[in-house]
C-alpha cells in the first residue's frame, strides 16, 4: 500500500506565497527514487500554476528532492555505485529500442524479460497478426473468380492448410525474435531472465516468481512491461470456447462461427482473417 505525504514548502523562499499555498494543499505518493520517462514525470510540471520557467524548474527540483528523501527513508539508502547505468524491465520493442539508444549513448545496460524477447508485438501481436492478414488477403484474391477470370486466370477450389498457416506466422515471429536477441547480445546488453521487481531505490530483483532471485542496482530504471489482453469481469477464458487474441494468433482451430468482442484494430484484423478463412463473424456492441 502506498502512503501519501504532504510536502511542506514553508521554508522555501524561492516561490511566491500564493504558489506555496497552492502546492501545500497537494499530496504526493513517493516515487521510489525513480526517474520515469514520458508521462510519468508530468506530475511535477504544475501546469495549472502560473509560474515562469525559472520558478517551474525550482518547484520540480524541490519536489523531486523531497520525494527522493522520503523514499530513501522508507526503503533504505540508495546505492553509491551501480551494476548498470540503466536497467530496462521488459524486452518488447519498446524496451529493445530503449536499450539500443542507451548503448548508443555509452550506457552500460541490462534488460530484464520474464517471458520471451520481443514482447507482445513480436510474439502475440503485430508480427503474427500481419502474417495472418497476408494469408487472408491472398485467400480473398483467389476466391474472387470474376476478377481473376477477367485477367485470364483460372483458379478452382482455392483452399488452405490451417497448420501451415499457423506455422508461417510462428516462424516469422521466431525469426524476428532471434534477430532482436542477437542484436542485443552483439551490442553488449546483458539479458537477465526473470520477472523484474523494484525492491528499493535504484534496486531491481529478477527471477522466477516465488524464488529468491538475484538483485542488481542501476542509476536509472525504465519500466517497459507492455500489456495483456483485457478480459471483462465474470468471463472465464478456457482457450476453446472463449479465447483472447493470444489464443487466436496460434490458429489452433478455425471455428464455423465466432463473436469478436471489441471493434478496435485488433478486432478488425481478426474479423478479416477469420472471414477470409471461412468463419462467420459477429462483432457485438457491448458496454464493457
Image (cartoon, grey):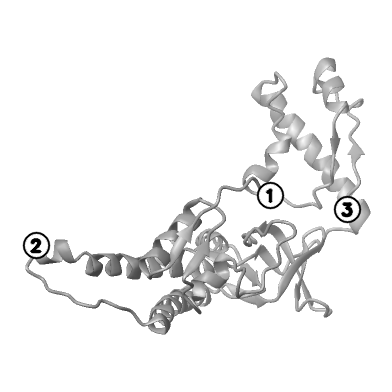
For mark 2, give the secondary structure. helix
Q: Nearer the viewer, mark 1 or mark 3?
A: 1
In front: label 2 or label 3? 2
Q: If you read the primary sequence from the N terminus, does the residue marked by circle 1 or circle 3 appear first?
A: 1
Residue 99 visible: yes
Give the labeled residue for mark 1. Answer: 36
Marks 3 and 1: in contact by CB < 8 Å?
Answer: no
**Residue position marked by numbered label 2 in the rendering:** 150
Mark carried by residue 72? 3
Please, is residue 122 above or below residue 13 in the view?
Answer: below
The spot of residue 153 in percent (x, y) is 10, 71
Q: Nearer the viewer, residue 229 or 282?
A: 282
Earlier along the polypeptide chain: callout 1 or callout 2? 1
For mark 3, give the secondary structure. helix
* Relative height, residue 208 to residue 263 (above, below): below
**For the residues marked 1 and 2, what is the alpha-carbon distance in whole angstroms?**
59 Å
| Contact flag, marks 2 and 3 (Cβ < 8 Å) | no
Quick check: 153 left or right of 140?
left
Amino acid at each position: 500500500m502506498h502512503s501519501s505525504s504532504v510536502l511542506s514548502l514553508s521554508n522555501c523562499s524561492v516561490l511566491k506565497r500564493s504558489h506555496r499555498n497552492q502546492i501545500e494543499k497537494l499530496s504526493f505518493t513517493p516515487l521510489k527514487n525513480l526517474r520515469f520517462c514520458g508521462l510519468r514525470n508530468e506530475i511535477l510540471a504544475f501546469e495549472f500554476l502560473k509560474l515562469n520557467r525559472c520558478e517551474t524548474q525550482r518547484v520540480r527540483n524541490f519536489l523531486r528532492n523531497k520525494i527522493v528523501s522520503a523514499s530513501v527513508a522508507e526503503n533504505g539508502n540508495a546505492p553509491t555505485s551501480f551494476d548498470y547505468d540503466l536497467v530496462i524491465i521488459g524486452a518488447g520493442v519498446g524496451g529493445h529500442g530503449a536499450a539500443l539508444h542507451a548503448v548508443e549513448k555509452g550506457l552500460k545496460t541490462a534488460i530484464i524479460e520474464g517471458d520471451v524477447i520481443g514482447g507482445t508485438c513480436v510474439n502475440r501481436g503485430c508480427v503474427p497478426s500481419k502474417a495472418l492478414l497476408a494469408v487472408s488477403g491472398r485467400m480473398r484474391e483467389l476466391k474472387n473468380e470474376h476478377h481473376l477470370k477477367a485477367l485470364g486466370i483460372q483458379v478452382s477450389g482455392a483452399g488452405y492448410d490451417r497448420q501451415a498457416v499457423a506455422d508461417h506466422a510462428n516462424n516469422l515471429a521466431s525469426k524476428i525474435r532471434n534477430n532482436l536477441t542477437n542484436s542485443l547480445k552483439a551490442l553488449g546488453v546483458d539479458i537477465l531472465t526473470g520477472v523484474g521487481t523494484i525492491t528499493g531505490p535504484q534496486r531491481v530483483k529478477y527471477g522466477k516468481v516465488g524464488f529468491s532471485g538475484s538483485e542488481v542496482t542501476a542509476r536509472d530504471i525504465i519500466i517497459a512491461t507492455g500489456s495483456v489482453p483485457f478480459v471483462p469481469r465474470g468471463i472465464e477464458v478456457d482457450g476453446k470456447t472463449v479465447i483472447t487474441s493470444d489464443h487466436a494468433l496460434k490458429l489452433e482451430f478455425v471455428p464455423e462461427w465466432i463473436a469478436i468482442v471489441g471493434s478496435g484494430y485488433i478486432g478488425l484484423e481478426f474479423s478479416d482473417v477469420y472471414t477470409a478463412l471461412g468463419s462467420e463473424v459477429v462483432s457485438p456492441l457491448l458496454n464493457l
